[in-house]
């Protein structure tokens, strides 16, 4: 896939394939194009050329809401919650697509809408509970720390019951103990048959979780392989910390 803004090419022929049930890592220095690639997959950016398929269905150029119906959910590097809404309300925001009928029916408050909403609320509360945020359900989002916003966003994405979940730097800013918890959480997500693509700088997390990684640098694919192969690849070391360090490691 290629992505250009005006004269600047942000992604040059970047591509990879993720098997169902895998945890796939997307790694690379800041500015490599990882978030832009996620934005292309999730329909927030339109690639200049290329192809994106989910279960064999071409979805390139689809709107985020359409992609959600194809089973795609994501979190953002910088979460943008509804700050004046409660945590529970924020989690429920993503799940409208799971209610039966459409907006007109929803506004009529039919019994089946009310029942489904109640079921979704219970599920949202369970998700918050399972992710250590049950206590915060009625708290306004702007009263929580940035780290907790990421947890709320993860619950919002999971309530969409995705097949494919994109996580953009979920560990950024988390203290060590919480990274361990996050690793356990992502393992559980995989056990629920959700395929995960994760962007992360935390190599401990990448090594603990991923089956494969692709490394991007300046919008190009540097290598694809296992996390261990990436960590010992001189091209990757050079991209992260410069040529001298790569020579020392070789
Ligand atoms: N909307 C945009 N308009 C112009 N340039 C962009 C836009 N979005 C991203 N870029 C550029 O794409 C490059 C990659 O950014 P990004 O995808 O955020 O990298 P990463 O997530 O790997 O740190 C950067 O040089 C950034 O300035
Ligand atoms: Mg990014």
Image (cartoon, rainbow, N blue to C red):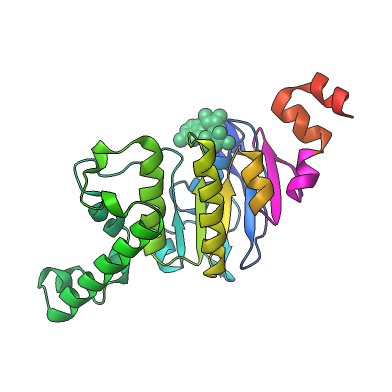
The residue that appears at 19% across and 68% down in the rendered structure is: 103
Q: Residue furthest bottom?
A: 112
Q: Residue furthest top?
A: 244
Q: How many marks?
A: 0
Percent across and percent down for residue 146 are: 37, 36
Say if 61 sits above or below 237 in the image: below
Residue 69 image-quadrant placement: bottom left
The residue that appears at 67% across and 39% down in the rendered structure is: 216
Q: Is residue 165 visible?
A: yes
Task: Depth check: give the residue in front, 175 or 239.
Answer: 175
Quadrant in which the C terminus appears: top right
Q: Residue furthest left?
A: 108
Percent across and percent down for residue 29 are: 64, 32
Asked whether, in this view, residue 125 is left or right of residue 46, the answer is left
The residue that appears at 52% across and 41% down in the rendered structure is: 177
Percent across and percent down for residue 157 are: 40, 57
Say if 68 sits above or below 87 in the image: below
The residue that appears at 57% across and 49% down in the rendered structure is: 198
Task: Depth check: give the residue in front, 250 or 128.
Answer: 128
Is 224 in the magenta?
yes
* Span colored in magenta: 210-231
Asked whether, in this view, residue 188 is left or right of residue 158, the answer is right
Percent across and percent down for residue 77 are: 46, 40
Residue 112 image-quadrant placement: bottom left
Task: Depth check: give the residue in front, 81 or 186.
Answer: 186
Asked whether, in this view, residue 103 is left or right of residue 75, the answer is left
Residue 244 image-quadrant placement: top right
Is 137 in the magenta?
no
Q: Is residue 65 visible?
A: no
């Amino acid at each position: 896939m290629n992505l250009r803004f005006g004269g600047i090419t942000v992604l040059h022929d970047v591509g990879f394939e993720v098997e169902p049930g895998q945890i796939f890592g997307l790694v690379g220095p800041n500015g490599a194009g990882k978030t832009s690639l996620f934005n292309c997959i999730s329909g927030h950016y339109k690639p200049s050329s290329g192809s994106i398929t989910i279960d064999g269905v071409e979805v390139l150029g689809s709107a985020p809401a359409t992609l959600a119906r194809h089973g795609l959910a994501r979190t953002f590097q910088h979460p943008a919650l509804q700050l004046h809404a409660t945590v529970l309300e924020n989690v429920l925001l993503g799940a409208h697509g799971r209610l039966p009928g459409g907006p007109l029916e929803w506004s009529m408050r039919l019994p089946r809408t009310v029942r489904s909403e109640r079921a979704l609320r219970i599920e949202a509360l369970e998700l918050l509970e399972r992710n250590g945020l049950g206590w915060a359900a009625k708290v306004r989002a702007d009263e929580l720390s940035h780290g907790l916003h990421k947890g709320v966003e993860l619950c919002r994405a999971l309530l969409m019951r995705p097949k494919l979940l994109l996580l953009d730097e979920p560990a950024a800013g988390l203290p060590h103990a919480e990274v361990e918890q996050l690793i356990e959480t992502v393992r559980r997500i995989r056990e629920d048959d959700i395929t995960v693509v994760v962007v992360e700088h935390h190599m401990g997390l990448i090594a603990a979780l991923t089956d494969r990684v692709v490394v991007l640098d300046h919008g190009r694919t540097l290598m694809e392989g296992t996390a261990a192969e990436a960590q010992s690849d001189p091209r990757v070391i050079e991209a992260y910390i410069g040529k001298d360090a790569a020579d020392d490691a070789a």
